[in-house]
Amino acid sequence: MTSTGGGDGSWLRVIPGDGGRGPLLTRAGQLVHGARRLGELVQRRPTGVTGHQWSTATREGYDFVVCAADTARPVFAVEIGPVAPAGSAGQRAERLKSVVAEAVGLAVLRIGSPTLRADEHGRSIVSYVIDARAYTAIGAGEPEPGDALPVGFRDILGRLPDGRTGHVNDLGALARAATIDAYVSRRLADPIVRGLHVNWRGGPAEGWSWVEVRPGACLVERVTVREERLSVGVDPARLAEDLAAMAVGERLRDLETAEPALTPRDELLAEIRRLESRHGEMTNGFAFAHLCAD
């Protein structure tokens, strides 16, 4: 069961704002700091963690650390970037970092993407998560009989940057608008960013997004979202799909100067069918079987 994160904070250090390393921004009563090593966040080696685990893990870091403004202690940490290959030294270091983070109750959000990067996309993503968590906290609790069901953060409608009405808290909204523009200017074969998302049982949420760049050839992005002792305030799988759409938009920026790596449409459909065949491993099943017939 996920929590809102933070624990009692007894293992976690106060994060100072001195030495030119003050917060990058303040939002909803929280301070967002840049990269920090795990050793800067934890006061001492917790019981049950070996010396080797401790020395290795504390050298590893996070891209952002969100702290409570009143205590300056971490609420959650964020990682954004490529997932370490299976069996690699990077994956082993990540596992040890996870052991220590779990032992001290540090909440962590891990976003795995080959395209999204902390320096380019991190602030907007972290701000989004802070806002989503704050919105969800305001609406926490059971509605009274007769009350309308609250609108989820992701489902709020409003005016989009291109003037249309749509979901203002869709992180892929700009990419979807840019795709339409690219289609109108005949740079794409299809104007729609398509996608799917799943929640793996005992694993991360995963989102796919793609657009047909050339007839029968698609630009595909996949993103994973893993909540560790944290709730991001929206369905993590839906967030993963929106982030994948954001990544599609990022790659489309270079469309005029370089041809991106494309996936044959038939190959993509085969991958979706393989995904559907694993529906028993998903917490909520597979809601995108209709795509298999495309």
Image (cartoon, helix red, strand yellow):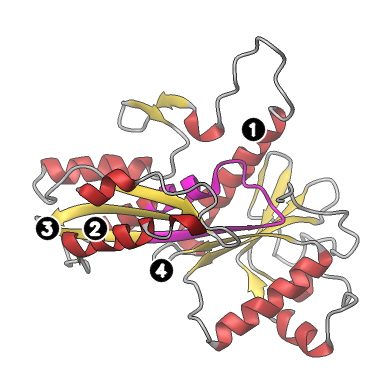
Check the image and report above or below for 182 versus 156.
below
Nearest to N terminus: mark 2 or mark 3: 3
Nearest to N terminus: mark 2 or mark 1: 1
Give the residues drawn in magenta, as a range.
Answer: 222-244
In the image: residue 62, left or right of residue 217? right
Foreground mark, 2 or 3, reads 2
Q: Position of residue 8 (x, y in %)?
A: 88, 54
Q: Which disc is residue 135 wearing?
A: 1
Secondary structure at numbered mark 3: loop
Say if the magenta span includes residue 161.
no
Q: Which quarter of the picture shows residue 29? A: top right
Is residue 37 or residue 106 the one in the foreground? 106
User: Residue drawn 72% across and 24% down?
Assistant: 142
Residue 278 visible to an observer of this rendering:
yes
User: Residue drawn 44% across and 32% down?
Assistant: 168
Q: Return the residue at label 4.
A: 114
Q: Which disc is residue 216 wearing?
A: 3
